Amino acid sequence: MPDSGQRSVISPPLVQSRLDGHPFGDPLIHIPSCESTNDVLWVEIKRGAGTGTVVTADCQTMGRGRSGSRWISPTGKDLLLSVAVPWEESQLSGYLSIWAAVSVAEMLMRDADVAVLLKWPNDVIANGKKIGGVMAETRAGYSLAVVGIGLNVSSQASDRPPELRDRAISLCEIHDRAWDRNILLAGILNSLGDWWQRLNRDGWPVLYRRWMDLCSTVGCAVQLTHGAEILAGIVEGIDLEGCLVLREMEGKQRRFRPPEITGLVPLEELPENGMSLLHERKKNDAGGTESSR
């Protein structure tokens, strides 16, 4: 990707000059600082903003992640954006996170030469660490949803709290070079537009298959927290509604929507008795994984 390495400020006209004619990024609103780009975009939607409106910021003080966690980013070093997307209240919001995560992953592989995987439901992983994340929000009475995206670009380990230094990574830490945030932002928006067009043309299964190709969670042993329950099992798949399909140690299959899970921790392996039960279940239930997708 060509990069002058000289632009540290987001320039909406420059970003828009690199877009491929899709609706995402028109208009593009950039602000120096805010509590949350998602919150700013909801205000704009109340004022009449439509599909494709994008809000970016150099700094957000109350950025949100899943389960009440915060997205922490130093001023002017990373990408923080929110996108307005058409939505119907009868639909599940799970596929919006999948759409955004696949789009970011495709941009990183294509434009930044970074190998990535996706961790259900909303993390983008490089070198085993989180490089990006997405956060989809819907509200009753609105025909638009808001999808927030964060991408670590130039931040360093010293910019992060100690508890995150071994869990996060940035583009600069993978490829030691200057990165133009305008070019990266245009790349993300173009990838969002491309996958949105494919989704509308070919349907959800096309996006779903690409998600499954990239998803590192499928096939893994995990410990899952669901309310007061703590469960262990094998992730057998992500179904067509974006739900995680878990095969518990005793062999029971269960589905969980992203908001229902407050913790998902990979396990090196399940307890020996649990693994043997799962293996026995799989022998007696051939094709179970495919039928759940």
Image (spheres, rainbow, N blue to C red):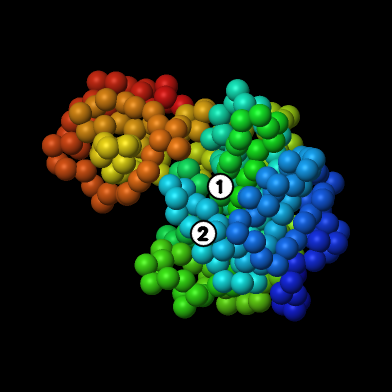
User: Which residue is depicted at the point 75% across and 61% down?
Assistant: 30
- Per the rendering, the mark at residue 64 is none
Number of numbered discs on residues = 2
Mark 2 lies on a secondary structure that is loop
User: Which residue is depicted at the point 49% across and 67% down?
Assistant: 169
Q: Are the residues at dot 2 and dot 1 in contact (C-beta closer than 8 Å)? A: yes
Q: Which amino acid does label 2 sit on?
A: Trp
Q: Quadrant of residue 50?
A: top right
Q: Within 10 Å of the Cα at label 1, are there few (<14), some (14-19), or many (20+) other Cα atoms?
A: many
Estimate the spatial distance between the alpha carbons at disc 2 and disc 1, rounded to whole Å: 10 Å
In the rendered image, which residue does mark 1 sit on? 135
Q: Quadrant of residue 15?
A: bottom right
Q: In this view, does 22 lie to the left or right of 40?
A: right
| 287 up-or-down from 194: above or below | above
Q: What residue type is labelled 1?
A: Met
Mark 1 lies on a secondary structure that is strand
2 or 1: tag closer to the N-terminus: 2
In the rendered image, which residue does mark 2 sit on? 71
Q: In this view, does 251 lie to the left or right of 39?
A: left
* Residue 112 visible at all: no
| 250 up-or-down from 38: above or below | above
Give the image location of residue 287, x and y in percent. Answer: 37, 23
* Residue 39 visible at all: yes
Q: Within 10 Å of the Cα at label 2, are there few (<14), some (14-19), or many (20+) other Cα atoms?
A: some
Q: In this view, does 77 lie to the left or right of 292?
A: right
Pick the quarter of the image with the N terminus: bottom right
